[in-house]
Amino acid sequence: MTEANEGPSDDADRIFELQEEVEQLKEAVASHAVVDQAIGMMVALGRVSPDQGWVVLKDVSQHTNVKLRNVAELILIWGRDGEIPPEISAELEAALDRHGPAQIPEASQD
């Protein structure tokens, strides 16, 4: 069918498709922000690089069978409220042990 032959039904279908795509993009942006914030927490609290923070989140997700975005949300809740499911906490600790710094630098002696 050419553009000249498209009717109102085709236009409505296209509008619907575009609305769906916009919603998916909005969800992706929101998800990305949550994951980025959780990576930031890993950097600050786990003393890892951003790349290592990503790997930690991915490991926790894979070892707990919880979607990465949901792991990130749980970590943000933990940062805000201090509450985290025990299985996530245990795997987070294990992942940080696997990917974190070999040793924590000692405080400088002044």
Image (tube, helix red, strand yellow):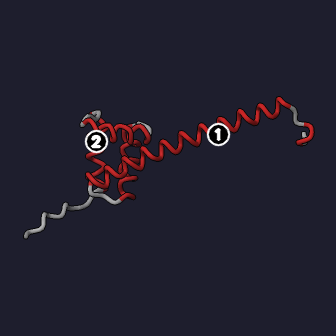
Helix, strand or loop at label 1? It is: helix
Q: Residue 87 carries which label?
A: none
| Pick the front one: 92 or 11 | 11
Front-most of residues 43 and 102: 43
Q: Which quadrant of the figure has residue 80?
A: top left
Residue sitting farthest toward the top = 9
Q: Quadrant of the N terminus?
A: top right
Q: Quadrant of residue 23?
A: top right
Instruction: Identify the mark nearer the N-term, 1 or 2.
Output: 1
Q: Mark 1 points at which residue?
A: 21
Write the residue at 20% across / 61% down. Answer: 103
Q: What amino acid is at disc 1?
A: Glu
Residue 15 found in image quarter: top right
| Rendered view: 56 above or below 16 | below
Q: Residues within 10 Å of mark 1 (few under 14, many from 20)?
A: few
List x then y, in percent, for residue 105: 18, 64
Q: Which residue is drawn at 38% across and 48% down?
A: 37
Choose between 41 and 4: the one closer to the eye: 4
Residue type, numbered disc 2: Gly
Q: Which of 107 and 89 is in front in this view?
A: 107
The numbered disc on residue 79 is 2
**Residue plotted at (36% across, 53% down):** 53
Question: How far, Cα to Cα, is label 1 from label 2?
Answer: 32 Å
- Figure quadrant of the C terminus: bottom left
Can you give x and y, in whole percent of width and height, for residue 4 in the image?
Answer: 92, 40
Badge 2 element: helix
Q: Going by the picture, which residue comes out furthest to the left?
A: 110
Task: Give how far across and how far down residue 89 sits, in percent.
Answer: 27, 39
Q: Residue at x 8, y 69 (%)?
A: 109
Total numbered badges shown on the rendered structure: 2
